[in-house]
Image: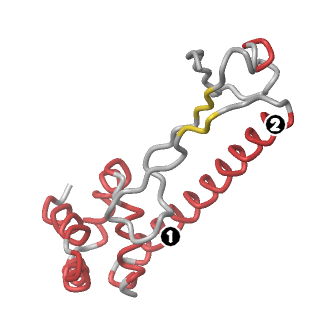
Amino acid sequence: MNFELAESVVGVLRSGSDARIACLRLERFREADWQRAGFWLDASGLALHLWDTLSHHRLTEILPPSVQARLRQNCYDNRRRTEAMFAQFASINAALDTAGIEYAKHGFMFVRRSTSVAKFPVGLGRCVFTHPADAHPAQLAAFPIQWLNVSLKPR
């Protein structure tokens, strides 16, 4: 792992109005540096934010072509996963509405402050809270959703 590269990536994401200058500093790193940093970029959650920042400043070409392709694919995959989660969330809400079950949706998406647009989910809370008078657990079991959480708090 090239720690100068890691520091430069973090610098890009912390630089605010000077992000364009910070982005240009990434040009000095070789493809091998980027390949070794790939796991760290993904595990740290910074890969999508880096690509977003470089795209915003129209500087994606400073990355080696293989890194560009990987980050572009990561963004595409992330967008598809997010769309699928939203569709599933809407489907669950519609099923609960159809069943006449009162519920409260509990947060679906949180976004890091460094992201220019709300498109990279960081934490996903997919919980539905109901009151026991509205839905018996056996009734909820009819929904083919394994991650449906029920809170039995009094009203």
Residue shown at 55% from the left, 38% from the top? 106
Image-based side of 109 in relation to 98, left or right? left
Relative to 81, residue 12 above or below = below
Q: Residue at x 14, y 59 (%)?
A: 3
Q: Where is the N terminus found, in terms of image quarters?
A: bottom left
Up-down relation of residue 6 to residue 134 (above or below): below
Quadrant in the picture for the C terminus: top right
**Of callouts 2 and 1, the N-terminal one:** 1
- Dot 2 falls on a residue whose secondary structure is helix
The image position of residue 118, as x and y in percent, is: 48, 64
Residue neighbourhood size for the residue with mark 2, other residues' Cα within 10 Å, grouped as few (<14), some (14–19), many (≥20) = few
In the rendered structure, which amino acid carries the disc numbered 1? Arg
Q: Which residue is mark 1?
A: 72
105 relative to 120 in the view: left or right: right
The amino acid type of the residue labelled 2 equals Ala
Q: CA distance from mark 2 to mark 1?
A: 35 Å
Residue pointed to by mark 2: 95
Tally the marks.
Answer: 2
* Labelled disc at residue 27: none
* Residue 90 vertical position relative to residue 62 in the rendered view, above or below: above
The residue closer to the viewer here, 128 or 37, is 128
Q: Secondary structure at mark 1?
A: helix
Packing grade of label 1 (10 A; few <14, some 14-19, many >=20) is some
- Give the percent coordinates (x, y) of residue 129: 61, 27
Viewer-closest of 50 and 106 = 106
Residue at (66%, 20%) from the top-left corner? 131
Looking at the rendered image, the disc whose residue lies closer to the viewer, 2 or 1, is 2
